[in-house]
Image (tube, rainbow, N blue to C red):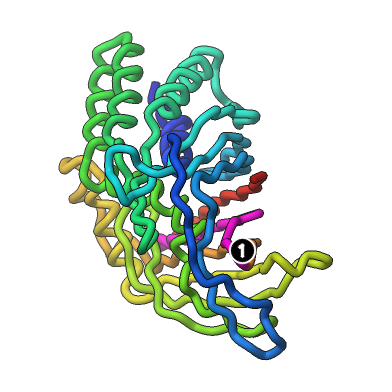
Amino acid sequence: MTRTLQALFPALLLASTLAMPSKGQVPVKGPAPTPQAQGKSLTLHFGWPIPAKAHIVEKSLKKGRKAVTSYNFELVPDPENKGRWIGRMSDIQVQQMDTMGLTPEQLALSKKLLGAVTSALPTLSIDPKTLEAQAQGIRKGVEAVIQILRSTAKTDKDKQLIALVSKSMTSKAMLATLRASSLSFWKAWAETWNGLEVPPKGRSKILDGVISYPMGGEGKCKVKLTNLGSPKGNPELIQLRYEQTGTGDILGIFIALMKKSLPPAYRDRIHKEMFESASISVHMQATLHRKTLLPQRVLIEKTTEVKMKGRPARKQLERHDYHFTW
C-alpha cells in the first residue's frame, strides 16, 4: 500500500495542473500588436475568441515517471457569474502512463484514483479584465481520491496509513500546492504574457517575478525574458523564453514548507543543520500567436536541487510539454 501511494500521489499533482467549459459568446477586443519592427519592442495582448476550444496533448515527467495525456480545454462565459469566464477540461484520455514496478493490484488502484481525480478536477473562474484566475473545487478532487483509498484498506495498518495520507492531502499546505499547480496551468498560457512588453528579436530583459515552490508557497525571483523571434515561415507566431531563478533564503523556505507538509510528529526531525543548500529554477518556452496569444506549444521545466551534508545533491526535474490544436 505504501509503495502504491508513493507511486500514485504524483498523479494527483499532475492531474491538478489540468484546468477545465460551457456555452455562450463574449467578444474579446484588445489592441492587436503590429508586426515587430527590427529593434523595436512589442507589447502582447490577450485576444482569444470566446468561446475558445483547444485539443491539448501533454507530455509530462514528474518524480521520474512519464505520462502522455490528451484532453479538451474550453473557455466560455460563466452563466451564473456574469462578467467572468469558466475554464474547464473534458474528454480526458491517458494515452501513456509509466507503470514500471507496479503490481496488477497497484495498477488497478491507480486507474481508479486517476478516474476519481479526472472526474473532479478544479474549474477555473477567470476575470476577463485582468485574466486573474481562481481555482475552484480543489477539495472535491482530493476527497474523491481519499474515498477510493479508504475503500481499498484491508488491514489496520492500511487504515492508519490512509489516515495519515488523508491528513496530509487535506492540509492547508497541500491544498495550497494543488491550487497553485492548477493556476500555473492558466498562467503559463495567458496571464504571464498579457500586457508584457517583449524586447526586440534576439534580445533579453530582466524582470522581477514570483516563483512557486514544489511544496506550496511562493517567493520572489528574477526573470530573464528572451525574444526568440518567429519560427521559420510563420511570421504570425512569436517564440519567447522565460527563465526564473529563486532568490533569497531558498533553503530556509524549503525547510519551513517541508515541515509544514509533514505530520507534527515528524517535524522535529528536520533541522537546517542537516542541509547545505537548495535551489529552484523554472524554464518556460512558449510559441504564441502574436495577435491573440493563442498558444501553439508551451514547455515548462522546473528544476529543484537539495544538498544534504555528507550526501550527493538530489536534483529533481519536472516537465510539462503542451501541444495545442485550435
Question: Where's the C terminus, which quadrant?
Answer: top right
Rendered residue at 58%/62% (across/down):
292
**Magenta-highlighted residues:** 291-309
In depth, the one of 119 and 30 nearer the eye is 30
Magenta highlight: main SS: strand
Q: Position of residue 195 (x, y in %)?
A: 46, 73
Amino acid at the residue labelled 1: Gln
Q: Is residue 113 above or below residue 241?
A: above
Q: Residues within 10 Å of mark 1 (few under 14, many from 20)?
A: many
> Is 121 contained in the magenta span?
no
Q: SS at mark 1?
A: strand
In depth, the one of 58 and 173 nearer the eye is 58
Most distant residue in the bottom direction: 39
Q: Position of residue 227 (x, y in %)?
A: 64, 76
Rendered residue at 47%/67% (across/down):
194
The residue wearing badge 1 is 285
Q: Position of residue 6 (x, y in %)?
A: 43, 32
Q: Position of residue 25 (x, y in %)?
A: 46, 44
Rendered residue at 50%/20% (across/down):
111
Q: On the picture, is 261 further left or further right than 206? A: left
- Residue 238 in view of the camera: yes
Q: Is residue 88 above or below residue 28?
A: above
